[in-house]
Amino acid sequence: MKGNFPIEQFEQLQTPFYYYDTELLRRTLQTINQEAGRHEGFVVHYAIKANANPKVLNMICQAGLGADCVSGGEIRRCLEAGFSPSKIVYAGVGKSDWEINLGLDKNIFCFNVESVAELEVINELAAKKDKVASVCFRINPDVGAHTHAKITTGLAENKFGIAMQDMEATIEKAASMSNIRFTGLHFHIGSQILDMGDFAALCNRINELQDVLEKKHVKVENINVGGGLGIDYQHPNRVPVPDFKAYFDTYARLLKLREGQKLHFELGRAVVGQMGSLITRTLYIKQGTAKQFLIVDAGMTDLIRPALYQAYHKIENISSEEPAETYDVVGPICESSDVFAKAIDVNKAHRGDLIAMRSAGAYGEIMASQYNCRELPKGYITEDF
Ligand SMILES: *Cc1c(COP(=O)(O)O)cnc(C)c1O
């Protein structure tokens, strides 16, 4: 047996399922609060799109974090989990009217607005309700994050945000709208970022933009730098908690906050990534001509990251201590991309062995689908055993 898993209890359960180590989640949340708490004006939100399991959300809410939502469904889910509307921010390039209305009805903290077209609709809908919507503008800072192309969001050619050169005109436009209150600037440059230099580049860009706005006497109450801090997928045991100190210190050192300004963060992966594992069972060992396949009962429907982003997840046989053999680990879905890993070493596996795919707490369960008419995987936390 390996790692921190209650294997005997796992044996009773239908696989595949997600297991969330809540001791690690608590430790992670404590570290976040401790490291962010060292700095005046830092406010941390959790990006709920990373993992919206109700029990997990409830723990994050208890730790005092706010919520970053990207849909009306997420707003509902985090209200159910206990988050106060006053701590909810709502971003997204394509907000439907019902979603904007929901945000207005619940009096959420802020809409992160991504276009002038959207701003006009929010103004109209707010007017109908005789309300004033607080908005931040999501600015595309044209800062590239050194990560996978599918998860960079801050480059000029991206669909996200308002171009820098349109920032001032957009703020002026907002000032002329009676049902809009401009409260700040929002940024998010991408995900799984481990190079603090990328965040440093964002800080420099924000400083430049703030200088421009200061000259025009535009008051900016909030700066929101989004999320993006990565986790160590290679070493989930050695580095279970991301380096939040380096992350927050980078912003504290480089970003010049103005008097009374709040600095908001929206962390997803770094909060929940390492605490989750996908637990699956070995169905067959299939001998190919040049390789052997370890066929498991989890597929890309349960964890799509390897198929979608060629993402790496450490794979462990938690039922075996036998010498390692080399396998391609594959699922049962009728797609050639349903491969978790190629030519990796795993302790010799037999039918029935439990396999753990580590670092799967973020963008795992929440991205599951029912393709091939499969059941969605369940999520269990430590307290369930
Ligand atoms: C996805 C997202 C986040 C969280 O990203 P992570 O890489 O998981 O930290 C934060 N803000 C916005 C606007 C997002 O879309």
Image (cartoon, rainbow, N blue to C red):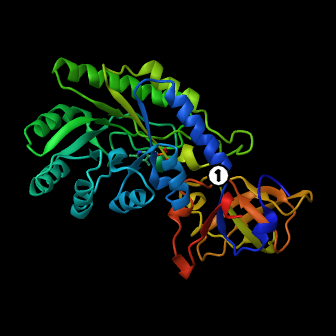
Instruction: Tell me what residue is drawn at x 37 percent, y 39 percent.
Output: 155
**Image quadrant occupied by the C terminus:** bottom right
Q: Which residue is mark 1?
A: 22
**Above or below, comparing residue 201 to residue 63 in the picture:** above
Please state if 348 lies on the left or on the right of 245 as rendered.
right
Q: Nearer the viewer, residue 11 or 314?
A: 11
Q: Nearer the viewer, residue 30 or 355?
A: 30
Please state if 90 lies on the left or on the right of 372 as rendered.
left
**Above or below, comparing residue 251 to residue 360 in the picture:** above
Q: Is residue 294 visible?
A: no
Instruction: Tell me what residue is drawn at x 48 percent, y 30 percent.
Output: 198
The kind of residue tagged 1 is Thr
**Above or below, comparing residue 1 to residue 241 in the picture:** below
Instruction: Tell me what residue is drawn at x 51 percent, y 55 percent.
Output: 58
Rendering coords of residue 88 (x, y %): 35, 48
**Image quadrant occupied by the N terminus:** bottom right
**Above or below, comparing residue 42 to residue 349 in the picture:** above
Rendering coords of residue 87 (x, y %): 36, 45
Rendering coords of residue 338 (x, y %): 62, 68
Q: Residue furthest bottom?
A: 373
Q: Is residue 98 visible?
A: yes
